[in-house]
Amino acid sequence: MIWLKGREMTRAIAKTGRVIALGAMSGTSLDGVDAALVETDGERIFAFGDSGYRPYSEAERAVLRAGLGHWSGPEVEAAGVLTDQVHAELLSGFPAAQIVGFHGQTLAHAPRRQGTLQVGDGAALAEALGRPVIWDFRSDDVALGGEGAPLAPFFHFACAKYIGATRPLCFLNLGGVGNLTYVDPRFERPEDPGALLAFDTGPANAPLNDLLQARLGLPFDKDGAIARKGQVEEGALELFLAEGFFAKMPPKSLDRNDFAEMVELVGELSDADAAATLTAMCAAAVAQGMEHCPAPPEMVLVTGGGRQNPVLMEMLRVSLDCPVKPVEDVGLDGDMLEAQAFAHLAVRVARGMPTSCPGTTGVRACVGGGVVSVPGEG
Ligand SMILES: Nc1ncnc2c1ncn2[C@@H]1O[C@H](COP(=O)(O)OP(=O)(O)OP(=O)(O)O)[C@@H](O)[C@H]1O
Ligand SMILES: CC(=O)N[C@H]1[C@@H]2OC[C@@H](O2)[C@@H](O)[C@@H]1O[C@H](C)C(=O)O
């Protein structure tokens, strides 16, 4: 659904050139909401601005967890109400924002079956903030035969230009799920065939977080301290890699809980061995994914919480043939890259530019997905 009047008005804002856009992301790790300002025209990044983070409390996380895997019903409604409240609270602290990109919280993702569901009401948020809000970024892509994910790649392309890259490189996001973007910055536009190849690599932190939560009541393996004491169980790793997803050619995407049974593969192991093995699975999935790159990248720039896990980073360095660096090494912010992505994508939607293409989601044609809601039009 497109609110034409809202879209026209928003396009008028975007046409003025540089826009101060605010992006917000509530990721699959369910740790909290990130928000960040980006000055962009949807093509180039001119500057990065302030950012903020609002962690979920244990009780709030439980509400979101209860909604995972559901498409409708009271759990979904409760998760939606919470998503709206927390975003309104965090985003109201950014009065400089001219336009808002609101990802919402993914509860379920099955693009070839039911579709994709991100809860959060952008129309209500537009009213609350008094700003145009772009939201529901993934549905149009899915409707056109795409995976609906990953969507950050069009922003990764702009980042590659921003850092002055001249040769192909990869961005690797290690959140709850992992996703990889191969960028060839020699192309002019992200939608140029060959400029981008992107896909989800496999589970990243989600299974490890889930295991530690269930066994030890810990939200995650801080600095890889538990995995560091353990041994990787090679048999379990082999079984994991035999899963058909890894050999499948891109495009491909995952739901957060698609690999939930991984935890069973390590069920008999000690806490340390189980953590080491789940960490190794994440790294091995990335190494498999790298095989799909059309050419060896100059480096892999790692973003998302997984870059803060030194055990995981060491495993990646051992298994990949190129330098593996946190995005901070090139002056980007790995805690905020996804929130920034949705700021940038919001401006692209407002300007009628594509946000995905066959190389990033497998969509039949380039599409600029997103609903535009403008205050006062609801
Ligand atoms: N110091 C650290 N040591 C180990 N792991 C960490 C550390 N900091 C963050 N993480 C991991 O990163 C996760 C958060 O990552 P991030 O915020 O990128 O996820 P997300 O954005 O919710 O997920 P997605 O990108 O899948 O939507 C944490 O849940 C934890 O597993
Ligand atoms: C359906 C969905 O929300 N997918 C997320 C998830 O988290 C990481 C990976 O799986 C990626 O495909 C995507 O998020 C990022 C921001 C993206 O769309 O690029």
Image (tube, grey):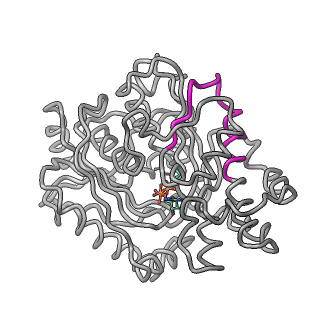
Is residue 23 or residue 317 the one in the foreground? Answer: 317
* Residue 31, image quadrant: bottom left
Q: Is residue 3 visible?
A: no
Look at 27% across and 52% down and name the residue there. 51
From this viewpoint, is residue 32 visible?
A: yes
Residue 60 higher or lower than 110, as above or below: below
What segment carries the magenta color? 282-302
Residue 172's place in the image compared with 92, above or below, is above
Query: 354 left or right of 150?
Result: left
Magenta stretch holds residue 284: yes
Q: What residue is rendered at 62% in x and 73% in y? A: 212
Q: Quadrant of residue 105?
A: bottom left
Q: Position of residue 161 (x, y in %)?
A: 38, 25
Q: Residue at x 33, y 76 (%)?
A: 81
Q: Is residue 254 above or below residue 251?
A: below
As rendered, which of 332 and 141 lies closer to the eye? 332
Q: Position of residue 374 (x, y in %)?
A: 18, 55
> In this orientation, which residue lies closer to the viewer: 229 or 259?
229
Compared across the picture, whether 331 is left or right of 74 comes to: left
Query: Can you name the residue that lies furthest to the front here?
Result: 229
